[in-house]
């Protein structure tokens, strides 16, 4: 009999302090990554403190490790925050659906991330960059509240090094520092200023619910078809496998039928997220 | 299996239940506790209080305990040891040395509504991922129900697609009559109880189907499909916000509900040893859906009770073609604000009817 709540133990290989309160943790199981796809999520835990839901932040094509990012906030994340390289993290997953990369091939893609919502965007972005020639022009728009809150600084430099790839970083008005060289403005505002068009293009979006709602409107204005706008929703989850009963939006269980949805699918949902 | 029918006298039902107790099975029945009745372990037939309509709580906790250990852990340095309890899960809810010979847990004197809750919850615990914690307890739970004669004003099992005489979810259904009871045996598990000894088998006299008393013509006072119809179309209705202004969000409706199964997962212990447990949770609590960011998809008590209605009469039905409600009325009887689910489902049904005219 299988215990579906039993975690595997994943070993911490590396910890990246992204901002004062966020970290990215690189993990292995039996010395390597696990099988998953961008968009999927897992249940990660500090054994003894608790379990939390995080999307994968790494490209699944990189086999040496898998990663997730978290903000230290409650008991479970404080526990994870206290762990060091060599310690173990409880892991269940991968769960949920994933980005349809087949549908994205040959097209221009704009990746839009807000705050820690950039984590699952990073996973599919780096997956596409790992097979760069399969895709058209890539634009990345990443926004954080303040300069201090910007994650993935090292990864951003890597993204910029790819051909035919534009990376635009913005902070909310008031979040800039005197020497800030990036953009200042909310993500939807900056988005509408970008030279991106909706024909033969796909948009990937993740961020706070309020950002997602406005970004979807902006993208439609820019000519994106609702089926070509793909977002990943994060709702509070406990089990991750359709039993604990809290992640649903109307009849849709985010953990089972999501977390990846098109704007068309989201349009059909009640305003319950 | 093909249903079988029996007659059994009052004296013999007492012998039968006492034999089941003596066979070292755990027998649970409605039992008086300081003036209220709860499903609890009995050591003699006379402990059972069969004169009340419904125990205060259902026997949900025998399928989904209020607190259940998912695994135990011990930590020394970087070394974590995880102990999986799954192989030792039995009718006793997971303790390794139950001392039971058979592992069976028998509910005697269940009501048809409570019996119906097991197979309804079972679907949730088995779509895709199989929850063996639930399954093992469900497999070992034997249910002998006694049909109700007269539902009260909070009951709406007939509207919820069962009835006071429904055998859905029961292994044996008893109806009062004749020299004591008539028995309908619905499942192999029911037959197993009757044939558990030659003495037990001798207590039951097989009769023809025709000799078993027919169900009364229970009539639904409203059409629950129309309740679902309203919910399908009216997510943003002001009904929800207005109706539940009085709700204090205590969650008693969900805790006393035989089919509410939502749970929380928490770690309990020290940084050396402890366990991961799941506890009953409630969609009526704000924290149930609260995001780490502070965003909450369900802000008002109206949003939360709407979710409860949606889950029971729309969402579950879309997935499993049944309602996540057995119409027992406990949520209403126990509500400190007298929020009455029968009244609500009836109102929504009527609103749907008049909208269709």
Image (cartoon, coloured by chain):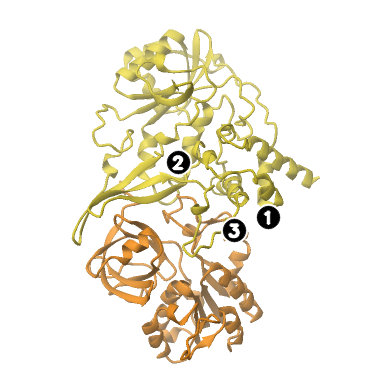
Give the left or right position of residue A91, taking residue A253 as reference.
left
Question: Does any portion of residue B56 appear in the rendered image?
Answer: yes
Q: Nearer the viewer, residue A243 or A150?
A: A150
Q: Which x, y percent locates residue B247?
A: 61, 43
Query: Which element carries disc 1, helix, strand or loop?
Result: loop
Q: Pick the quarter of the image with the N terminus of chain B.
A: top left
The chain letter for the residue carrying disc 3 is A
Q: Chain of mark 2?
A: B
Give the quarter of the image for residue A34: bottom left
Quadrant in which residue B11 is drawn: top left
Residue underneath mark 1: B236
Q: Are marks 1 and 2 in contact (CB under 8 Å)?
A: no
Q: Position of residue B125 (x, y in %)?
A: 43, 45
Separation (CA) of disc 1 from disc 2: 31 Å
Image depth: mark 1 or mark 2 in front: 1
Asked if marks 1 and 3 touch (Cβ < 8 Å), the reply is: no
- Name the colour assigned to chain A in the rendering: orange
Q: Which chain contains the residue that carries disc 1?
A: B
Residue labelled with disc 2: B122
Colour in which chain B is drawn:
yellow
Provide residue B102's location: percent of width, then percent of height: 29, 27
How many residues crowd mark 3 within 10 Å: few (<14), some (14–19), many (20+)? some
Q: Using the image, tell me which numbered label, if any, was put on residue A272.
A: 3
Locate residue A133, reporting x and y percent: 43, 87
Do callouts 3 and 2 point to residues on the same chain?
Answer: no
Q: For the C terminus of chain B, give its image quadrant.
A: top right
Q: Quadrant of residue A61?
A: bottom left
A150 or B5, nearer to the observer: A150
Q: Nearer the viewer, mark 3 or mark 2?
A: 3
- A23 to B66, vertically: above or below: below
Of B108 and B319, which appears nearest the observer?
B108
């Amino acid at each position: 009999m299988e215990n579906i709540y039993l975690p595997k133990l994943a070993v911490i290989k590396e910890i990246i302090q992204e901002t004062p309160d966020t970290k990215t943790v690189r993990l292995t199981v039996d010395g390597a990554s696990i099988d998953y796809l961008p968009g999927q999520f897992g249940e990660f835990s500090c054994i003894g403190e608790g379990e939390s839901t995080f999307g994968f932040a790494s490209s699944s094509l990189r086999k040496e490790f898998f990663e997730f990012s978290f903000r230290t906030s409650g008991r479970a994340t404080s526990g994870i925050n206290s762990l060091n390289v060599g310690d173990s993290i409880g892991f269940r997953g991968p769960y949920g659906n994933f980005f349809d990369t087949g549908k994205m091939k040959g097209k221009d893609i704009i990746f839009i991330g807000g705050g820690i919502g950039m984590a699952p965007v990073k996973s599919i972005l780096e997956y596409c960059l790992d097979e760069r020639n399969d895709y058209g022009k890539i634009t990345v728009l990443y926004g954080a509240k303040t300069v201090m809150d910007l994650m993935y600084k090292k990864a951003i430099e890597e993204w910029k090094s790819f051909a035919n790839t534009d990376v635009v970083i913005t902070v909310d008005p008031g979040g800039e520092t005197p020497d800030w060289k990036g953009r200042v403005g909310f993500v939807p505002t900056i988005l509408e200023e970008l030279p991106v068009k909706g024909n033969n293009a796909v948009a990937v979006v993740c961020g706070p619910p309020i950002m997602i709602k406005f970004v979807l409107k902006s993208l439609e204005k820019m000519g994106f078809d609702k089926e070509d706008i793909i977002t990943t929703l994060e709702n509070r989850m406990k089990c991750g496998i359709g039993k604990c009963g809290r992640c649903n939006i109307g009849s849709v269980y985010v953990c089972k039928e999501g977390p990846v949805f098109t704007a068309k699918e989201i349009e059909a949902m009640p305003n319950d997220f | 299996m093909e249903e079988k029918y029996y007659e059994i006298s009052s004296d013999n039902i007492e012998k039968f239940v006492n034999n089941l107790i003596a066979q070292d099975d755990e027998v649970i029945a409605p039992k008086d506790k300081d003036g209220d009745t709860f499903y609890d372990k009995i050591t003699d037939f006379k402990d059972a209080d069969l004169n009340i309509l419904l125990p205060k709580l259902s026997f949900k906790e025998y399928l989904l305990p209020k607190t259940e250990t998912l695994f135990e852990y011990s930590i020394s340095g970087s070394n974590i040891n995880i102990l999986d309890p799954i192989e030792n899960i039995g009718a006793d809810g997971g303790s390794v040395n139950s001392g039971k010979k058979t592992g069976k847990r028998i509910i005697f004197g269940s009501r048809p509504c409570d019996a119906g809750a097991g197979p309804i919850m079972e679907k949730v615990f088995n779509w895709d991922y199989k929850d063996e914690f639930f399954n093992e307890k469900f497999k070992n739970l034997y249910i002998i129900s006694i049909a109700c004669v007269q539902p009260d004003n909070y009951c709406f099992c007939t509207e919820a697609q069962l009835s006071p005489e429904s055998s859905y979810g029961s292994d044996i259904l008893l109806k009062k009559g004749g020299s004591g009871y008539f028995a309908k045996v619905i499942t192999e598990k029911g037959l197993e109880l009757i044939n558990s000894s030659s003495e037990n088998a001798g207590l039951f006299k097989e009769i023809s189907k025709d000799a078993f008393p027919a169900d009364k013509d229970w009539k639904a006072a409203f059409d629950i499909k129309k309740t679902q119809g309203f919910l399908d179309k009216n997510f943003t209705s002001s009904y929800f916000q207005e109706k539940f202004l009085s709700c204090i969000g205590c969650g008693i409706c969900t805790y006393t509900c035989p089919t509410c199964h939502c749970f929380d997962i928490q770690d309990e212990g020290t940084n050396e040893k402890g366990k991961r447990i799941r506890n009953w949770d409630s969609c009526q609590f704000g924290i149930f859906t609260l995001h780490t960011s502070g965003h909450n998809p369900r802000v008002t008590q109206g949003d939360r009770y709407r979710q409860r209605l949606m889950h029971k009469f729309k969402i579950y039905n879309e997935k499993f073609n049944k309602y996540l409600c057995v119409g027992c009325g406990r949520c209403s009887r126990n509500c400190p604000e007298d929020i009455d689910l029968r009244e609500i489902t009836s109102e929504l049904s009527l609103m749907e009817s008049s909208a269709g005219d």
